[in-house]
């Protein structure tokens, strides 16, 4: 049997895991995007950084087959935004991404790695966690 102190430690660890999942966010899942596209995420063209039209956003979402990569922008006008990239059924990364501003990666498990001006995470959608940026340092998405 477990001692009272061991039970308390187990409850504490379980609470920590629960809190992490309650406050952490991930890129939208394929299932959630197909069911009802999120209004909190905006779709952008990878080449020119311009927001996609509603028609192109729909085409983008309909071509998604799997999550590819999460990117956290560290510099420039989009500093603090998370970009979510997806692949089509052929495995090609789609030349568009979903973005959400004012986030910071959770890197306790070291899944995020440095790539010229940003951090990338390709560990899997459920492992690429991020949380809202503190109110004192609120970057926003740039508009073109």
Image (cartoon, rainbow, N blue to C red):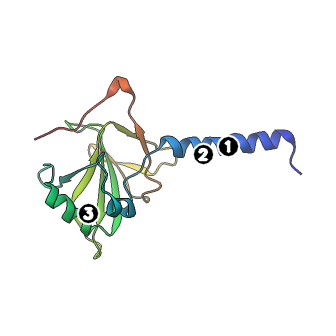
On the image, the x and y values in percent for residue 99 come to 27, 48
Viewer-proximal residue, 122 or 141?
141
Is 28 rendered above or below residue 143?
below
- Which sits earlier in the primary sequence, circle 2 or circle 3? 2
Q: Secondary structure at mark 3?
A: helix
Viewer-proximal residue, 4 or 73?
4
- Distance between mark 2 and mark 3 Cα atoms: 31 Å
The reply to whether discs 1 and 2 touch (Cβ–Cβ < 8 Å) is yes
On the image, the x and y values in percent for residue 14 come to 66, 45
Q: Which residue is mark 1?
A: 13
Q: Quadrant of residue 133?
A: top left
- Which sits earlier in the primary sequence, circle 1 or circle 3? 1
Q: Residue at x 25, y 70 (%)?
A: 92
Q: In the image, which is nearer the foreground, mark 1 or mark 3? A: 3
Q: Which residue is mark 2?
A: 17
In the rendered structure, find residue 61 and report the number of the disc placed on it: 3
**Disc 2: CA contacts within 10 A as few (<14), some (14-19) or many (>=20):** few
Task: State the residue lying farthest toward the bottom.
Answer: 90
Q: How many marks?
A: 3
Q: Secondary structure at mark 2?
A: helix
On the image, the x and y values in percent for residue 143 come to 14, 39
């Amino acid at each position: 049997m477990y001692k009272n102190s061991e039970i308390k430690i187990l409850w504490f660890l379980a609470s920590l895991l629960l809190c992490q999942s309650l406050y952490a966010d991930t890129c939208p899942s394929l299932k959630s995007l197909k069911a009802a596209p999120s209004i909190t995420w905006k779709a952008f063209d990878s080449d020119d950084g311009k927001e996609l039209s509603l028609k192109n956003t729909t085409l983008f979402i309909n071509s998604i087959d799997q999550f590819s990569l999460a990117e956290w922008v560290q510099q420039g006008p989009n500093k603090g935004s998370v970009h979510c990239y997806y692949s089509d059924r052929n495995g090609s990364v789609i030349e568009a991404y979903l973005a959400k501003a004012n986030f910071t990666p959770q890197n306790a498990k070291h899944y995020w790695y440095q790539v010229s001006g940003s951090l990338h995470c390709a560990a899997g959608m459920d492992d690429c966690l991020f949380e809202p940026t503190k109110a004192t340092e609120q970057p926003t998405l740039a508009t073109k």
